Amino acid sequence: MSTIKDVAREAGVSIATVSRVVNNGPKVGEKTKARVLSIMAELGYRPNENARALVTQKSKTLGVVIPDLSDPFFASLANGVDKVARQNNMQLLLSTGLITEESERQAIRLLLERRCESIVVHSKKLSDEEIIEFANKVPGLVLIDRFIQKIADRCIWLDNEEGGKIAARHLMSLGHQQLACISSKYQIDDPALRFKGFKNELTESGLSLLNQHIVEDEPNLQGGEMATQKLLASDTKFDAIFVYNDAMAIGAISTLEDNGFRVPLDVSVIGFDDVLLSRYSRPKLTTLHYPIEEMAEFAAQLALGNIKDVTAQQISSGYKYIPRLVKRESTSLHSFSK
Amino acid sequence: MSTIKDVAREAGVSIATVSRVVNNGPKVGEKTKARVLSIMAELGYRPNENARALVTQKSKTLGVVIPDLSDPFFASLANGVDKVARQNNMQLLLSTGLITEESERQAIRLLLERRCESIVVHSKKLSDEEIIEFANKVPGLVLIDRFIQKIADRCIWLDNEEGGKIAARHLMSLGHQQLACISSKYQIDDPALRFKGFKNELTESGLSLLNQHIVEDEPNLQGGEMATQKLLASDTKFDAIFVYNDAMAIGAISTLEDNGFRVPLDVSVIGFDDVLLSRYSRPKLTTLHYPIEEMAEFAAQLALGNIKDVTAQQISSGYKYIPRLVKRESTSLHSFSK
DNA sequence: TTGAAAGCGTTACCAA
DNA sequence: TTGGTAACGCTTTCAA
């Protein structure tokens, strides 16, 4: 691959001049410019970005740390960041970190070694302290899907608790009174917060959520099916289910129908996330929209320093997103005839 | 961010020594090594990969060119490449190219400028000639989902035509005789090849495919629904449908059931791709598995030069993958009672 | 308008 | 076992 020197030699000019031509620099004679340009084309010259990064101290690279791309959720996240990267003439450098503390740490380090000045981090395992440390070191590091008070102004997160409340209100507004929940068996924050909000909202309306009305399983299709079987086996009565995510919700619907229940006629089902799946299910799933791509785009802009006017609100509680209720076909007015 | 010089100064050694420590180089005194290591930790020193890339002439980066990450298909592709990158201590640099000729070209160029020596390219718009030119320039450039004879040994592609044949055989083996097709309205290679294979296989068995039995629409859920309505409206008889992709197939099932047809009892439906969706649909979709992630992993290994023994077969027709039939619930024996 | 040269942070070779 | 130094390909002053 030819270098700036080759071009300079062939064109009979100095490398400084070639550099000026490459960068559309000022003050280059029309004739020299034309000659250099033609030599560049002839040689197929392409400037070496690594060398540029070294001298200019900027990498033209937007880093993103996620477990991997196999989960559509993270693919959407990465896609949002990539969109912004492209808008800003930068490229996406992916650093996948699985879900161990050490690999998350390593993923961030690799980005730092490439002198990536803007980084969107999704991390569940690293301690608050370590993340804060990284954040202090890198002004362009931003946290997505997690809230840490000390770096609140760099956190972009979803209010899961409010999501639970919205689900509760929706179900109650339809006349449902016997609510059940299907949760994830993994004890991370998200499910806990969603059901906390859900439960609190019920309580405020004088309804209660019995323990036997909450079942747990793997957060996927099969998990949803299994959980629903447990629910049916437990012989409790319910006319609506709030499910941890869309995949489980679809599993729940499947099992309900296999057991003679019609959704939403006999039982309403509401999911969470609003992934692609929810529009493909029959009946189409009512769910809470998790605007991950939008959040990721915002996070990227924030990392790039493109967000200017920040309110006091945002400085203290970060950039909080509220899930939006998407009414489709899996919930409907409770039929009191039953 | 501190540099190797800072570490050298603080530790009272030369930068050469620090470099040796960093790279676990040979011949470094235990005591100096320990001292340097502790200074490095203290300063939070991280080697600058850009500088390294400049001097070593390797980027530790695996490039991938795709339209974007919003399509799960491309996300899987990228995920496959990323897996291999990680196994080889490299990182994924994403270059998204939309679907215009110029942006595909630009996406490849950006990767070249970063001196990415291994690149997995998905390109539909660039001409064969231009791709060959790039390939000649970069030994580590590999083409996925496309076959070009002159660089056959660097092409990883799916035999769409064979996929169509497999679908035809499956449907015929179930006793179906009145076949219909739902295709994509976009005239790219894939649908054309799939239906060509399908049709040919029918012909060989003495069955024919009438023109009014082929309808087209957008390759998504709604498109599948619309296409199916057209099919029903045309008043032709059919007992099985071969659909361009899973999304359309799910739309087809939905419309069929809305019109009183039971799948697979009255009509068998077979899709293509085997995306996540197909396992979530009811009935679960019978489809042809497109092993894109596996293909992407292989492509990445090939780009890295990790594939050694190549057969004559592969040199002449590239790395050809055959879609695999996945029997689920949307196809079944034709009931002759009807 | 052009060129010379310093410097970006490394690695790797040659001496010591 | 260590250090000095050229070189990687480029940008950016400073002079001319």
Image (cartoon, coloured by chain):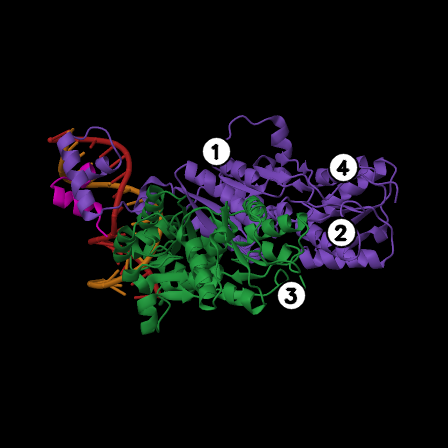
Chain colours: A green, B purple, C red, D orange
Q: Main secondary structure of the magenta part?
A: helix
Q: Label 1 belongs to which residue?
A: B305
What separation in Å lies between label 4 and label 1 (alpha carbons)?
38 Å
What separation in Å lies between label 2 and label 1 (alpha carbons)?
40 Å
What separation in Å lies between label 2 and label 3 (alpha carbons)?
43 Å
Classify residue A332 by image quadrant: bottom right
Q: Which of marks 3 and 1 is in front?
A: 3
Under mark 4, the amino acid is His
Tell me the crowding category of disc 3: few under 14, some 14 to 19, or many 20 or more residues within 10 angstroms, Cα based.
few
* Callout 4 touching callout 1 (CB < 8 Å): no
Q: Label 4 belongs to which residue?
A: B170
Please, which chain is the residue tagged with disc 3 on?
A: A
Q: Nearer the viewer, mark 2 or mark 1?
A: 2
Q: Identify the residue at image location x=64%, y=46%.
A: B278
Q: Residue A336 carries which label?
A: 3
Which element type, helix, strand or loop, lies under badge 1? loop
